[in-house]
Amino acid sequence: MSRRDSFFLRCYSACVAVMIGILLIQHLSALETTTQPSAVIGSSESTFVDHSLIIAPEYPCTWPSAPFPRFQITHQRTIGPDSAYNVDVLLIDGNTGTQLDVPPHSVARPELMREKSGPLGLAYTDTIEPWQFGGEACVIDVCDLLDKAPKGVSPLVTPERVMEFEKRNRRLRQGDVVLFRSDYSDLYYRPFPEGSRFIADALDRKAPGFPDPNPDCMEFLASRGVMTLGTDSASMGPLPDLAEPTHYAGLKHGMIWTESATNYKALPPTGAFTCMLGPKHQGAPYGEGRAFSIVGGELPKRLIDAAKNKRALDLSPTLGTQMPITSPGIATGQHRQVYLKIDFLYSEYLDLWHHAHLMDSMAGSHLVPPSYSLPLEGTPPIHSPEVRGWLIEYEKNYGPRGTSSMTTEKVPLQWTCGPARVIDVRSLVGSTRQASWPASPEILRTHIEGYEKEHGPLNPTDIVLFYTGHLDRHYRPLPNEKGVWLDPLRGTSEGWPAPGPEAIVYLKSKGIRCIATDAPDLGGVDPKRALMTYWALGSREMVGVEFLQNFGNISPTGYFLFAAIKVRDCHGGPGRAIVLE
């Protein structure tokens, strides 16, 4: 072969390689497009999209200005000789991670008689109606504004940008949730030191501010009847001096909104159901939360219609320092962290303290992930002799306990959302003998089968809710709080009905992933039986939602929604549960 022929052969081979590469890229691109919103929205399946930032100490998850406290998680107790469970304590401010703002953030209470006073100054996170948390996502793309401003200054989203969205899609209306997509958090929410770019560098005028709507944009949205917003920037307040004017322009109309969201790029311009759920702190002008959307299939339409027509039911009790929201423990020294409100910054105009909470990760409505009761793989715990005996008995009857690394942030959102199947077990109340107290009536497999015989079989996507009526009857502030925890644990009253491990095994056979209760917990007051129930849940990769109320008002067509805040390595998870009808 001549040198010239060899040269042409090499050129030909190179061209062939390039063509193959192009075809491969096109093929991979075609595969990737199947996961894009346009493909999902036309699918018969519904997909959950998480819009929440991970909360962890090495991330810029808290507002960096003094005196806002830094987020902390303390693994207070781990599975071992003195604890059968992994127990965590959180120090968390409402401005942590993905968060919710409500009117008292800027609107003063009516009795203060100030220029910005009004009835909405009392619309705290615990009084907002649950229908307002969700609706149809209308995603306004403002990515072209990203970093298009001087350092320390936010590019502004004006009414004209909203009008452009309406020309391309449709007119905005009541029931819509307007989401401003800039991809800011997607790009800049990183561990430190890179994470300083998310908020601190913009505040220190080292980098451009985050894109945000101006006050005129808020007024325009209010004229359309829009009551719920979201942004994937660090705040809904433009830097350096329009934060408060923009907040007040929207909040004075009763708007609420999500800040520091992420992954809006996964949504179509319209058609997805989106919502924000967070702990129900008493008197809070803002709060930490979990934002997510549902795309594709018929489910989004159904949920959008329910929210728009205000067919929503709140299942979470209000959290307050005078309420019995954490376990006092069965024995001395076994109590959980008491729920504390920590004031740290006073707003003179609002006559309001900014505050954080020090609380057990299972305070109020919360998630029970598998890792709560199961040890990590490769780290066999040394149990107390009593618990070792219980474990031998459990494994003989129900199989290996197993291990788990599934902490709260790893639990899929779709596991804790689904059709509500309310199993009424109130008939069990009063069925134990007083001589046997402390004792809880046990929910058996036969009770579940009896429900199925009357109401139809359980399906894998269902959320099973055990209706005991316990919190409805006993959830009261001090000094009338003892009926929730203390009296049942001490044996001066009967414990609440709770499922035993046999019931859990049966539910798993039906494909159920999540069970919930309107009692303090799913274990009941007997420590041995409670631990076996939690082992059964964890070893079968099932989760629980505990400390709910109001089950008696759930209709047979209700759809249950629960989400816990996205704290990394957390063995519990405060959250909020609602039902859309």
Image: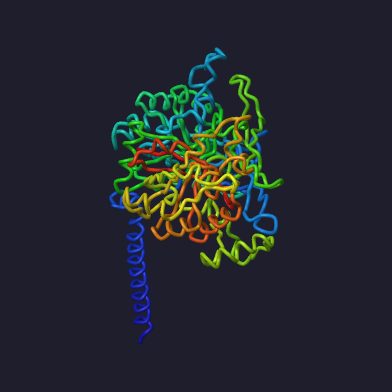
Can see residue 64?
A: yes
In terms of depth relative to the viewer, which is nearer, 440 or 309? 440
Location of residue 176 in the rendering, given as x and y in whole percent from the top left corner: 36, 34
Image location of residue 520, percent across then percent down: 55, 43
Which one is in front, 307 or 346?
307
What residue is shown at x 53% (from left), y 36% (from top)?
209
Q: Work out whether 438 lies above or below 532.
A: above
Residue 81 drawn at (x, y percent): 70, 59
Tell me the quarter of the picture where residue 327 sits: top right
Q: Nearer the viewer, residue 20 or 418?
A: 418
Which residue is farthest right?
A: 333
| Residue 155: image location, x then y, percent | 48, 34
**Residue 200 in sight:** no
283 and 204: which one is in front?
283
464 on left or right of 247? left
Tell me the quadrant of the picture where the N terminus can be found: bottom left
Decide: is 393 above or below 162: below
Q: Quadrant of residue 159?
A: top left
Question: Is residue 100 positioned above or below 352 on the image?
Answer: below
